[in-house]
Image (cartoon, rainbow, N blue to C red):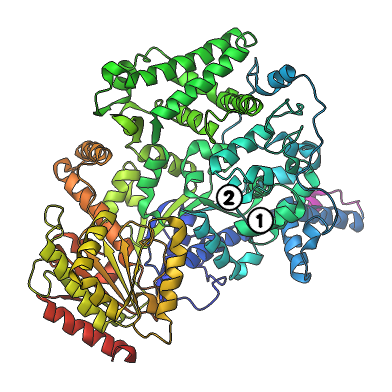
Amino acid sequence: MGEPPRPPPTFSGFPFEPYDVQKELMGAVYGVLEKGGVGVVESPTGTGKTLSLLCSSLQWLVDRRAAEECGDEARELENAAAAAESSDSENPDWIKDFEVEKRKSRLVKRVPAPRATAALDRARLAAASSTAHWGAKAGSGKPVGRAPAGAGEDENAALEEEFLIDDERGERSEAGKRTFPAELDEGSESEESEESEAERDHQQILYCSRTHSQLSQVVKELRGTSLANQVSAAILGSRKGLCVNDKVTRLGSASRINEQCIQLQQKKGAKKAKGEAGGGGCKRGCPFLHGKAKQDKLVRRILSGPMDIEDIGAAARKAETCGYYAARKAALDADIVFLPYNTVLSKSVRETSGVRVKDSFVIVDEAHNIADAVNNMHSVVLGLAQLRAAKRQVLGYYNRFKNMLSPQNGRSVQMVLRLVEALLGCFAAEQAAPGSEIVTVNDFLSKTGIDNINIFRLSEFVRETKLFFKVAGYTEAVSASESSGEDGPEKLGSLNAVMDLLFALTNNEEDGRVIVNRGGDADQIKFVMLNAATHFEALVREAHAVVLAGGTLQPLEDLFLQVMPTVDRAGVRTLSCGHVIDRKNLLTLTIPKGPTGRSFEFVHSKRGDPEMMLDLGRLIVNACKVVPDGVVCFFPSYKYAEEVSALWSRRGILGQIGQKKVVFGEPKAADEVESVLARYKAQIESESDPRGAILFCVVGGKMSEGINFSDRLGRCVVLAGLPYPNIYDQELNERLRYLNEVSAGRPGGAGRVLAGEHMENICMKAVNQTIGRAIRHRGDYACIVLADRRYCSERGGPFRKLPDWIKEADVEHCENFGALYRNLVGFFRRMGPASA
């Protein structure tokens, strides 16, 4: 990459003196932004990756803005001087000076209104001890969420006004533009300045991660930097997390909340239908969408200082206005926007959310699963029960409104019914023999008899008319009046699944496959996206720069093949940072056999060997004698963990482990994870019981990513075997076949061996994420035990795909258990007195 046009940045926003690897990472990210294009950076967990990404990208934004403003000022002053010299010499000096000052004053006006307002608001908040200025006054006595009751208009008229498809479709919204409820935009044309609209073309940083909790942590990191006072930030959350209408949030599931919110927006001032189950109970939709002044105050509050989802939700309740749409409006003007993967990786979601990618800088953190994220986002599962429910709902809607629909709309609704009937035909008696069938999109359309339906035109009709939202709303109104719950609690779920499949069938023939599963409860149609690159490369083309960041992204060839096969590798900036820890703080031990000499080879065909399972148990019993505090042991699957645990329990191994460490296991229910972790931590920190604890987990499970086993919580990580994916999985095999074809078509491609490589890559990505749970900061130390003979060779096999920071630390390939035990004793004796 070429030298940046400006002097090297100093990254003064970093809250403390950065380590060398942090300086290296920030310099690389800054360079990518200067040049544009794509960057791929690896920085191990515990090296301050998030803070480095924030400080480098925001420093670039601040520097670029300062350079632009200085350039504007210089040009303006030059023009002023030239104008003064060329003015009539007879004009007095005070007139010439007035012209110069007039031109100078324009510089102030050029600061975009949202940015200037946010700066003033930050100063006001810093000077004030209370933020009550932003919300409604406490104890105002105003009823929250209460709207005037309906005036009792005719039911039929209300149903027609609310649910009947318009005869003329509205103009399609321009890509990337916001699609807010009309109530939020009332008066915006007259009240917003030209500077405000111009500001919405400014370059933004879009910071993406997998979950809202991870994004909230990034917001907390931003608060600790001085840059938080120089830029504005916004975070995009879900309706479930930001809705303040209790009558909507009590519906529970995200899909029902989304459905009810959209239906409330479509009321268009219609009166409440008789018997309608109004989610907000309003004749003009949701009461929290009324009142532009309240919305604007909350938007200003969001832009005045970094707020996470919880902060926005609390402020929205206090202000009695919608937090979801306030966050979206704030994101239009923010310098940095925090958002989950799916909001930026899907074009349709970007457009409906108002996210502007063009010329922006996109950071994708935790990018090791980026290909899976894109594929999963664009894959669809449609069950037989959902098809039947969708048919019932669309048919009921059509029978009710067929005499009122325009001829064109009526034919289109009939076409939707025909499509659903054809999909149901996949499970007709003559075709319903149990089994699976994998076909291309064109073959699927032909076999179901819908190849003569214009799928593209039909999908546009459904999208533009919001047909399925109207069908769901009508179904809800009728079922409420008839006290019928026939379609279950999520009426929109079935229709959404049909809509998603309809849109999926518009993909290119080679980009996906359709899988039809028949047999009892497994009756379903699945669209499997194979080509993540078709969606991700579109993002790369639009954005000014894209940085993929992660603890480990190796092997990069696999990453490029899946998401950026046509991007010029020569123009991509890549960086792999080392760790901040001393190499002596990490010891990696590989072991090919157990204490009795039983070979460790946890391949699927051999891992059920009872003697190998017992020898693994004996290894862990002896390790627990040496390792202080916490031990975390990972198995390749939930099923195998249960088999091993049952055998150990019968043969007394589990009891022996319990004498040395208190035993905990990964729960299957996600809502129990925090409780187990809390008890695990409490046991390790217990002064009355010095045994410590051991936690049995699963690779790829709830505790293999995003969980912090720092310091005493993870002094040793044991990994039993290699978590290779199931070779009999249909989707995996289809994806491998596709990657073979892609690889064979590239210069130097080796399609015949790619399948095995890809399987190993999937496995080692999971391994690398798992063992990265242990080392979390510079002063941390831990030992990693890799129990499988396949780890024991550095020249080939999976060991070569371990992260460099592990391979560059102390590594011992132990020939037997005795060597492993001696290394464990020596390591913990050297690192601390707790193990003496």
Percent of width and height locating residue 113: 74, 51
Residue at 29% from the left image edge and 57% from the top image edge:
765
Q: Name the residue beneath numbered marker 2.
A: 237
Image quadrant occupied by the C terminus: bottom left
Q: Nearer the viewer, residue 739 or 120?
A: 739
Image quadrant assignment for residue 283: top right
Q: Is residue 499 above or below residue 790?
A: above
Which residues fall within the magenta stretch? 82-91
Percent of width and height locating residue 561: 29, 45
Q: Name the residue beneath numbered marker 1.
A: 312
Residue 809 visible, this angle:
no
Residue at 48% from the left image edge and 30% from the top image edge:
494
First-in-chain label (1 vs 2): 2
Q: Which mark is residue 172?
A: none
Q: What's under tag 2, amino acid-wise?
A: Gly
Q: Are marks 1 and 2 in contact (CB under 8 Å)?
A: yes
Is 90 colored magenta in this rendering?
A: yes
What is the crowding at mark 1: few (fewer than 14 residues within 10 Å), some, or many (at least 20)?
Answer: many
